[in-house]
Amino acid sequence: MAQIATGEQAALRTLFTRHYSRVYRFVSRFVKDRDAVEEVVNDTFLIAWQQAPRFEGRSRVATWLLGIARYRALGAVKARQARPESVDEQHEATLVDPSERVDARMQREDSSDYLKRCLAMLPREQALLIELHYFSDKSLKEAAALTGVPLNTIKTRMFLARKKLATMLVNEDSDSAAADSMPGERRRGPRLSAQLVC
């Protein structure tokens, strides 16, 4: 944990490899959807990475991780329960104007361009994994089969890619806030999709 607190990625990979299965099984008790379980597990290790400097060793590392995982899992369950019932497509068509608003289309195109720039800054194997998982709807197991890379390596790469994208989002938000406070400055890019970094 001391090495992780200094930003040592090799130590983070060790933590991830050592505790991934245990955290996954624990989260599965609360969350039944497999993709949602993966999200919560990745969030858990991302938070551990961010909070490592605050780890004081009062409990075992595994206990600390499971505490984070429990908090994230309960939040995921609560969010899922709070979602309104889905509206069937026919009824939805009567509620929503089918013509896309110009500002919505421009925002979507800006988001897409910004996301492409962020993906270009990731290592090639991490960018490929993000594209497979989020844009081609491939599970991590399917991504492992397609790339010929072991599943545990895929999980580690996904975690590191999400961490880097989260950092880009924080930096982009900071630049955005600075630009908003300076007249005439234009915002660098739209927010990254919350699905990728949350």
Image (cartoon, rainbow, N blue to C red):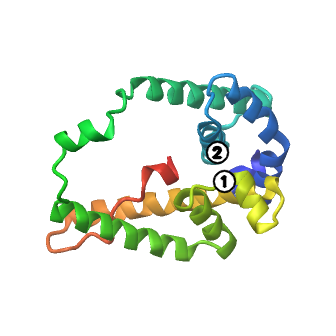
- Name the amino acid, label 2: Asn
Residue at position x 63%, y 28% in the image: 32
Badge 2 marks a residue whose secondary structure is helix
Give the x, y percent position of residue 137: 57, 55
Q: In the structure shown, which secondary structural element does the residue marked by tag 1 occupy?
A: helix
Instruction: Using the image as rendered, state which of residue 192 and residue 10 is in the foreground.
Output: 192
Q: Quadrant of the N terminus?
A: top right
Residue 39 lies, with reference to residue 131, above or below; the image says: above
95 relative position to 13: left or right: left
Residue at position x 44%, y 68% in the image: 115
Q: Residue at x 81, y 38 (%)?
A: 21
The image's mark for residue 159 is 1
Residue at (55, 75) in percent of width and height:
121
Which quarter of the figure has residue 127? Answer: bottom right
Confirm whether residue 63 shows in the render.
yes
In whole angstroms, how far apart are the C-alphas of marks 2 and 1?
Answer: 6 Å
Picture layout, residue 59 above or below residue 180: above
Please tell me which of labels 2 and 1 falls first in the chain: 2
Which numbered circle lies on residue 28?
A: none
Q: Amino acid at mark 1?
A: Phe
Tally of numbered discs: 2
Q: Are marks 2 and 1 in contact (CB under 8 Å)?
A: yes
Task: Tell me, yes or no, if residue 8 can be seen here.
Answer: no
What x and y, as percent, mark residue 110? 31, 70
Left or right: residue 183 versus residue 44 is left
- Percent across and percent down for residue 184 are 15, 74
Disc 1 crowd rating (10 Å Cα; few below 14, some 14-19, many 20+) is many
Q: Which mark is residue 42?
A: 2
